[in-house]
Amino acid sequence: MNSTFTGVTSQEYKYGFVTDIEADSVAPGLSEDVIRFISAKKGEPDWLLDFRLKAYRHWLTMTEPDWAKVAYPKPDFQKIVYYSAPKAKAPKYASMDEVDPELKRTFEKLGVPLNEQAALAGVAVDVVFDSVSVTTTYKEKLKAVGIIFCSFSEAVREHPDLVKKYLGSVVPYSDNFYAALNSAVFTDGSFVFIPKGVACPMDLSTYFRINNKESGQFERTLIVAEEGASVSYLEGCTAPQFDTNQLHAAVVELVALDQASIKYSTVQNWYAGDKDGVGGIFNFVTKRGLCKGRASHISWTQVETGSAITWKYPSCILLGDDSIGEFYSVALTNHKQQADTGTKMVHIGRNTKSTIISKGISAGDSSNSYRGLVKVQPKAEGARNFSQCDSMLIGQTCSASTFPYIEVQNRSARVEHEATTSKIGEEQLLYFQQRGIPAEEAISMIINGFCKDVFRELPMEFAVEATKLLSLKLEGSVG
Amino acid sequence: MLSIKNLTASINGTPVLKGIDLEIKAGEIHAIMGPNGSGKSTLGKVLVGHPSYEVTGGEVTFDGKNLFDLEPDVRARAGLFMGFQHPIEVPGVSNAAFLRLAYNKKAEAEGRDELDPLEFDDFIREKIKLVSMKEEFLDRSLNEGFSGGEKKRNEILQMAVLEPKLAILDELDSGLDIDALRVLGDAVNRLMRPERALLVITHFPRILETIRPQFVHVLSGGRILKSAGPELAVELEERGYDWVLEEAAAGGSR
Ligand SMILES: Nc1ncnc2c1ncn2[C@@H]1O[C@H](COP(=O)(O)OP(=O)(O)O)[C@@H](O)[C@H]1O
Ligand SMILES: [Mg+2]
């Protein structure tokens, strides 16, 4: 009757199927020629090819970072396919009816609300399928208020000045190894522009899906909110099951001008590999927001449950006086997953404020690290930060670590850091069971309670999805 | 209803229960008394299936079924309840949501209708009156920041919601002032039915003035040293436990 915490989770990856769509790809490998091919294929202007080549040349001088608490075989960058696109019958679809039925079925299995449901839910969906945007809904409605929400490629074609002005302004191509790689080879992504004074009338949502075996995914997202504008952006991901590790190195840049507000929410559920750690996505993402204007506000909320390796630190540069940065995160790891995630809050302007709430949940043999930097620069008079980092362990063989880095160069700053580690102990579990609640439901309830402060920052539908996802991911975590 | 035969159990390899025999029938109230560390809580926890305790021998049946064949949550839904001596705190889980899930799990198991949040709200508002609990406690996190007495109130509220066949109440009186003790004691009495039973664990006889047992057992060193009627509780109050231990050492009782 000794019930233990072995036999960890085992909900097989629900979205593990492959779609049979002819891909239009380059041969594996990376060179200036490949970059020129990508750029030409996309009909890009010279300045963008230039940006890519500079990034590539810089990348060649860099080495892969190894300071994160993750261990993995280094990807062979010459084996990656840097461009693949689903074959389109026409350059652009006028309506959903024209979209490949095979592709539509895939989305249905994934539960992507690309149809009327999306309309009812009030969500505009920009679907990225293997690097190239297939369709964008609601554009007209958004257009009426002057909002641009389109694929990155389209933005390059239709709004080159805006892209040129902001691309790389938050994450320069030289920023880090993966950002440099992304800058050289990114194929597509999303672009959002909210003009002065406009509050985006609906949540904007992008579903990413990695479909092509061994195709690296290098998404580029750029969101700009002008003075007084506001937007809530949702990113959700699923990927099919493969045995070969897949690299994902996205770059997301957010720019908020005076009194603008950007809320960026992610629920990430990429294939994490099987129980023995075979396969799974390598997720090396650079996400950064620049609170450029006075009293601007950037908020990151993430629920990270997938990927074999996660290396991700959504950050805020608080440049404008009175600007606010927030980071709310739930990172769940199970089996052999490794996550090293956290945030950076860099206080530059006066009276800038930041809040960090991080909840790490580890089960199985996984490793889950929080790494956060709070930096207060000399001129950041009156800066304030509050950080709360809680870890929860399920079972005996997982690990959780917290690495808070605090650098304060202004005496008027107030920085508070709290950290706790708890175990879903036998006592808690027994208490629930003693009231007739089965162990799995008990764990799910305890975990959701633990994550409440983060979930309440998510848009409603996302919060519901996230709750289900965590339960799914932890199914079988107790024996 | 509950039949315990020569039960032995240990924790971390240390034997704590050393051969317990106990029969509880429907309609009965039993009290287990004994000095601190005698194994009273252990007995309760073993019965409800605490994973840290290892059952090393003996048999326990509950309503004719081998108790140790059932998972802890199955035992609970079958009508076994324990009010804990130290109820645990669970941050972020609302008390009301927890109570409703527990209620619905039992309803489901018994083929009764589950209650939606609104129906449950009506239901629970009635129940909290029984334990004189303020409504605000329903919206708080489960036991988080509750005082000792509030936690005990919450335990009895859960008992009222689940209406168990057999309730084991472990040191209900600890952390309670006299008024609260009377309120909760009365609540427990009102939940008692001919088809139900109670096992009251305590080392202070005081609570037995409200919840009146027909049978009193003295547990010490993992064994029941003496069993008698309610007069034993009175005697223990007057004389303490030592004489029972001495009597047992002399090979007297049982
Ligand atoms: N987790 C544990 N590890 C080791 N010994 C324990 C543990 N829990 C209880 N014990 C021991 O078991 C004995 C009985 O404890 P308990 O049942 O809590 O006593 P009571 O409830 O009668 O005061 C005590 O000697 C106590 O020290
Ligand atoms: Mg005790």
Image (cartoon, coloured by chain):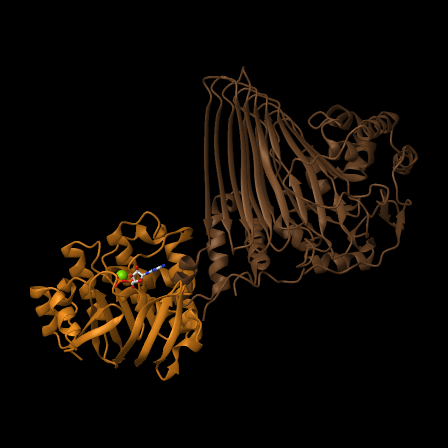
Chain colours: A brown, B orange
Tell me the residue at 59%/48% (across/down). Answer: A367
Image position of B19 with respect to A361: above or below? below
Spot the residue most to the left.
Answer: B238
Q: Residue at x 54, y 15 (%)?
A: A378
Q: Is A384 placed above or below B102 here? A: above
Q: Considering the image in quadrants, where does the N terminus of chain A appear?
A: bottom left
> What is the x, y in percent for residue A143?
71, 36
Residue B253 to residue B170: above or below = below
Quadrant of ligand 1 in image: bottom left
Question: In which quarter of the view is residue A124 placed?
Answer: top right
Drawn side of residue B75 relative to residue A237, left or right:
left
At 49% from the left edge and 63% from the top edge, which residue is drawn?
A: A4
Q: Does residue A373 appear left or right of residue A249 in this picture?
A: left
Name the side, left or right, on which B4 lies relative to B104.
left
Query: Can you name the residue that lies furthest to the bottom here?
Result: B64
From this viewpoint, is residue A339 visible?
Answer: yes
Identify which residue is drawn at 45% across, 48% down.
A422
Residue ranking furthest to the top: A379
Looking at the image, residue A412 lies above or below residue B104: above
Q: Quadrant of residue B103?
A: bottom left
| Residue A337, horizontal then vertical, whole percent | 64, 51
Measured as percent of width and height from the top left, residue A250 is found at 73, 39
- Residue A423 position within the rendered picture, expressed as x and y whole percent measured from the top left: 46, 52
